[in-house]
Amino acid sequence: MQIGEQLYAGKAKSVYATDNADILLMRFRDDTSAFDGEKKASLARKGAVNNQFNAYVMGQLEKAGVPTHFEGLHAANESLVKRMEMIPLECVVRNLAAGSLCRRLGIKEGTELTPPTYELFLKSDALHDPMINESHAATFAWATVAELGRMKELTFKVNDVLKQLFLDAGLLLVDYKLEFGRYRGDVVLGDEISPDGCRIWDARTREKLDKDRFRQDLGNVIEAYEEVARRLGVDLG
Ligand code: TMP
Ligand code: ASP
């Protein structure tokens, strides 16, 4: 496979064209950011860990019937994905209260959320990823009502699969963020699933094993990501 020009560079990943018009290369960089890019660092091994973590999780989701853009690993920190038209929304499910939910609603961190909550955010660093609802998304044509329904359905299906997968590894899936795209008329899971975009706690001690270690200066960020990967049985090469 020939790798072509860089099409896009986000805060943690870069996307390249390939000689197949339907396939893109996604490079996971070591760059790490939080607070809409205000806090930044380069964390050795992160790109490779997240790439291999994502490959494993996307594979499990495909097996469970969730359509994903993932096509295959290309290198330790690179994967091949379907070229999609991305929907500029972030879909968040929360099983336990943490992060912005606690700040916004005054809920105590760790409170069990039954049923889990579902939230939509507009993907815009300039606007600080504001929370929106389905009415905004339809009015401003970020997604159709049918697409929004499918995104919600798939986001909860991911919860069914991953909550149990993580629990079996002694981990709590606290919350996570998904992004979707359009591919040949279908809504398909895109972006990545990794400890950058999820909250994951040790099931017994509730120790944080995700990007909150970076956000909150808790140290051992990548060591925690590797611990999660190891417990799930991800092959880190
Ligand atoms: P929040 O508590 O900050 O709203 O985040 C909820 C989940 O979504 C958490 O697992 C982190 C993830 N997330 C991202 O991956 N990227 C983002 O830009 C935001 C706002 C959240
Ligand atoms: N990913 C976002 C950023 O880099 C938000 C976050 O994860 O805190 O700013």
Image (cartoon, rainbow, N blue to C red):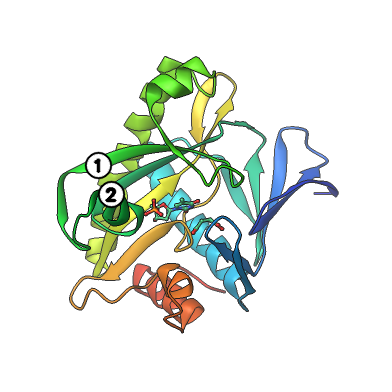
Instruction: Give the structural element (helix, strand or loop) at label 1.
Output: strand
Residue type at numbered disc 1: Thr
Viewer-proximal residue, 72 or 50?
50
Q: Residue at x 46, y 76 (%)?
A: 226
Residue 220: which disc?
none
Q: Which mark is residue 117?
A: 1
Confirm if mark 1 falls within 8 A of ligand 1.
no
Front residue of 35 and 64: 35
Q: Which residue occupies the foreground of this view, 105 or 17?
A: 105
Q: Position of residue 96 (x, y in %)?
A: 22, 56
Asked if ligand 1 lies within 8 A of label 2, the reply is yes
Residue at horizontal 40%, vertical 19%?
A: 135
Q: Label 2 belongs to which residue?
A: 94
Q: Is residue 152 above or below residue 232?
A: above
Q: Earlier in the sequence, mark 1 or mark 2?
A: 2
**Badge 2 element:** strand
Does the CB distance between marks 1 and 2 fall below 8 Å?
yes
Q: Quadrant of residue 182?
A: top right
Alpha-carbon neighbours of circle 1 within 10 Å: few (<14), some, or many (≥20)?
Answer: some
Q: Position of residue 19 (x, y in %)?
A: 83, 40
Q: Quadrant of the C terminus?
A: bottom right
CA–CA distance in space, label 1 to label 2: 5 Å
Left or right: where 73 falls relative to 23:
left
The residue at 29%/69% (across/down) is 201
- Would you say 17 lies left or right of 81 here? right
Q: In the rendered image, which quarter is residue 97 located in? A: bottom left
Q: Is residue 23 above or below residue 6?
A: above
Above or below, 89 against 128 in this view is above
